[in-house]
Amino acid sequence: MSCTIDGKPVAATPRPGQCLRTFIRDQGVFGVKKGCDAGDCGACTVWLDGIPVHSCLVPAFRAEGRAVTTIQGLAPAEGGLHPMQQAFHDAQAFQCGFCTAGMIMTAAALDEEQRADLPRALKGNLCRCTGYRSIQDALGGVGAVQPDVADEAGGACLANPFSTGIVTGHACYTMDVAPEGALDGMLHLKVLRSPHAHARITGIDRGAALAVPGVVEVFTWEDVPRRLFSTATHEDHLVDPDDTYILDDVVRFVGQRVAAVVAGTEAAAEAGCRALHVEYEVLPAVFDPEAAMQPGAPLLHRKGGEGSGNIYADISGEVGSIADGFAEADILHERTYSTSRVQHAHLETHGSIAWRDAEGRIHVRTSTQAPFITQQKLVHLFGLRARDVHVFTGRVGGGFGGKQEMITEDLVVLAVLKTGRPVKLEFTRPDQFDAATTRHQMTTRVKLGARRDGRLTAIEIRVVSNTGAYGGHASETLAAALASPMSLYRCANKKADGFAVYTNIVPAGGFRGYGASQSTFAIECAMDELSQMLGIDPFALRRLNMIGPKDWIESVWKDVSDVGFGSYGLDQCLDLVERRLADGSGLPAPEGEEWAVGAGFAMAMLECGPPTEHRSGAEMALLPDGRFHLAIGSTEMGNGSVTAHGQIAAARLSARLADIVLINADTDLTPYDTGTFASTGTVVAGQAVNLAAEALRANILGFAADHTGTAAAEWSLELGAVRRGDRRIPLDALHAAGTGEGHRFQAKRKAYLSPRTVAFNVQGIRLAVHRVTGEIRILLSVHAADIGRPINPMQCRGQIDGAVAMGLGWALTEHMVHSADGRVVNAAFRNYHIPAFADLPRTEVLFADTYDSIGPLGAKSQGECAINPVAPAVANALADAVGTRFTDLPFTPDRIFTGLGMA
Amino acid sequence: MDLHSITQVRRPSSPAEVVGWPKGHAWLGGGTWLFSEPQPGLDTLVDLDGFGWPALTVAEAGLEIAATCPIIALDRFVPPAEWPAGPLLRACCRSLLASFKVMNTATVGGNICMSLPAGALIALTVALEARYTLWSRDGAARSVDAAEFVTGDHRNILQPGELLRGIGIPAASLSKRYAMRRMTLTHLGRSAALLIGTQAPGRRNLTLTITASTPRPVRLHFAAMPDARTLAGAIRARVPDDGFFDDVNGTPAYKRHLTYQFAEQIRAELDAGA
């Protein structure tokens, strides 16, 4: 077959069932992405003779004689960017950038009529990061990127330093490497997954699988080190249970690994999986955590903790006496609220590629939030020496906590060790639902006591968390659920009991908001209900009881903590949202008497960083050309932390962001970093950069002083030079001079997470709900954040946009549905609906005016907590509109119908 | 996605070249459904693309739509002004979950043969009392009422190897007035209920088509405009209360609720304007 791709003639024969997407990638054009491989997400959009199509749905042979245009061929041949690429750059209309290629190829193809109806025109393009606000800006020609000026990097709206690669399709994501060089002869690994929720494998006949042409090896539980571990990644390996084998002879959820087949092609590996004959002894299964806690429930694990049945973790605490507190109360409110199991849905699925080099070292290129912990786990599992394992990331296409997990790397390393050949494992989109992790489903009973004047006398919660078949993140998310959402209120008497329980469901893991989202939903709904009962305005009730800057920060434990107020802006956030809800902002209510309108809000507090250890290192050096090298172990997965790191370094070194040459997330090339999770990208890794840059600055100025026989304090850095009065030495010259004298312009610093500051978020929602169809329309979404001084306000706004969008998905559309036998029913984006452009309002994002005394450059954590107040704000607005309290997420129209008893 | 079990693609220039129909064969239209899910049971794709059927033909008898007509062509088709039901063509195209990019390659016949309860082009053609022309591998053709084609979720009356050749919408139907109601759990999502009522010009009759909320389309004819009770009774007689479709696009109870609500709204709308 012959065709052209981006103007270049291609002569190659596609496989009979091959789709255009993989055919294009086989030609080395990796700008065409796989988000779903099923036509739902649009990441693979290309033009066929100028017509935009989802290349994953187009049979490759149909390209015969036609011109294929990808993101890599969109820019004019003479150089520069296509206007739409430029618009996406200027509006920074991406975060991880994985959807961007398809988004731009769609946007650039729209006609006038389509541009006037973006909800419809963009319904086939999903973005999980941005909430589409910045994409709308790009299409409207609204760009807010500021120029990159020396000495002004801190607090400026600078473009992500990888922007050009992202908008041109050249950014290299995990799977964007050709099978050549070190990857020559790469094998593909596919996993046979359990059809049963709970079963013992009594036999696996691999004969037929091994007979499939192309199949190289089959691995079962008999082939792996019998070593328990947790797939969850944390600095402290003891916070997660060692309850997992690479491959096990007992399967505990539908979708669990049964066997791995490696073959020369994906097709052969899949055929090998189908040819495996497995015999199971089906065991009784339990899906409901309350049932799983009952005596006699089927026990999932016998690994030392079976004395407490399926309860993996139980955490409780009490300050004061809730018995006294409830006795003092004039009014009590008690209700149970529950949240749903949802998937991260980062557009880049999990995947990794590993190979062994001539020296025997193992290299793992992977889509992870924690390369260093992954390296440690691989070393542990396979008995390797740390120096023989190298783990690194390419560009990572979204994480949201989902990639704080080692769920592909162990299998590819196993296969490399056994076969000696490079091996790749790439999750499909259904794999993401069946076998990656999810948010913990939690059910929270809240009991509040208050005096008639509104003062809280006691708060009690009981949280039951369904951790699924494995316990990674279960205790940490449970602890988080009992922590900051309780600390948010000043009350002498508080008590919390929490249980994280094993069930035969796909395991839960880390997810933006991390347990606090779930209990915030419950407590913020309960506070709203309490205000109704008391007849006190909900803002007034919050102000009366919310934590103030002079209060002791305490949830339900009396232990001394390292959390303090580096700054306080909750009061400002509340004022900002209250004003916006009152001033008539937002869309008008739809016409018709069936529409009921209501408003509500909720607030959330975040301890900036986890209570457990978290550390990060940064190395900096002056380069011979006068620019600066920055090596940071922290991962960038669209959260923008690398942009922030560059800006912090530039600010400290009086430089431009463009002068900072960045490398990150590589166990060979960068200092140790625990991982980018738990809101640490700015406050820990950023702090390491801050300290390293400060040290390099002192190093450079100190050398300039020594070199000239003057005092260091008289020297200052400016763009490309050091200066003392009229004397200016360019940095390249200084570097040459210093190197000649044996001086080294280098610095390395480490940052730890203590003390921790706190951040606040308040979300306001006004919505209309249709009393006949149950449809909800968001009329106003306003979010106020106290995140200290934003290092990059545009980027921070983008993060908050994205968090609010994800919160609205959780509140309104997303819900993993399981069949009675524990299978995920809706393992595709067409049935598991993450918000599309049409589903989301434009959120107004406002910042409290604070400067933090703990975080670097006055900044606090900002990527995570904004999700937490969103779902309860929707619930409170819904209750205000219809007078009925909806307690269980999500609020889909059919559930509204049921709740309102409309029939 | 790549369909790894496919070992050959046949690209005939006429259906007559396709003799016999071994297990594992599948007709390939736009491919937008076939390539959206693994198809481990298939080994051969037989491409309809080479048949060269004209996509849309306007004739005195009405509108002939080739099964291979890209949905985008139907969406962009400007119907003759004398067809009051003409706008329904586009309205139904736009009731699909698919984006315009999918519609660029997906075909009308593909949507019908996929036979999803929410297939909006099934709704369109049933409501407009179309007839489908089916060609079997032995050369025989048959013509069936659109309402009889889909028999359940992903089920229809096609025999192995039989293909949908085209859809004929009679001019009489296109000259009708119509009213349409639709609801989706998410904005611009997949239909939970899609109901269409039509009324012949100058008449006070009603043809009501219920789709998406039921596993297969239901079409009810009323020679005279029914009152609300009669209409509800007629629906109940055709669709038992437990006969509504259960999937992630809405609970059966919700779909039942929408069905009765929308049916009455359509009845009232067409009654008012008669």
Image (cartoon, coloured by chain):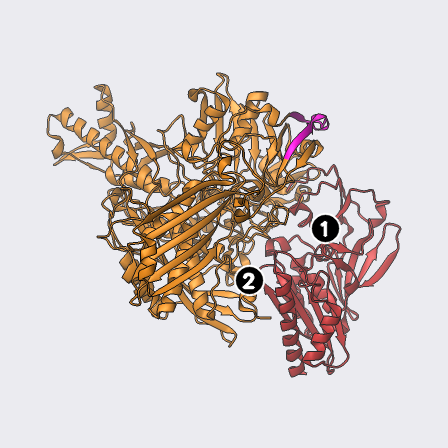
Kindly check if marks 1 and 2 are in contact, taking CB atoms under 8 A apart as contact: no
Task: Specify the quadrant that holds the C terminus of chain B.
Answer: bottom right
Looking at the picture, how far across and down is residue A376, in whole percent? 43, 27
Element carrying mark 1: loop
The residue depicted at 47 percent of the width and 47 percent of the height is A465
Looking at the picture, how far across and down is residue A285, in whole percent? 61, 42
Residue A895's tag is 2
Would you name the residue on which mark 1 appears?
B29
Q: From this view, report whether residue A83 is shown above or below residue A706.
A: below
Q: Which shade is chain A?
A: orange
Which amino acid type corresponds to the residue marked 1 in the rendered image?
Gly
Residue A844 visible? The answer is no
Looking at the picture, how far across and down is residue B79, in whole percent? 68, 69
Looking at the picture, how far across and down is residue A438, in whole percent? 51, 45
Does the segment drawn in magenta span residue A282? no
The residue depicted at 14 percent of the width and 25 percent of the height is A706
Q: Nearer the viewer, mark 1 or mark 2?
A: 2
Which of the pair A175/A731 is nearer the observer? Answer: A175
Question: Mark 1 — on which chain does it sit?
Answer: B
Residue A509 visible? The answer is yes
Q: Quadrant of residue A140?
A: bottom left
* Same chain assignment for discs 1 and 2: no
Residues rendered magenta in the picture: A200-217
Q: From this view, report whether residue A276 is shown above or below residue A349.
A: above
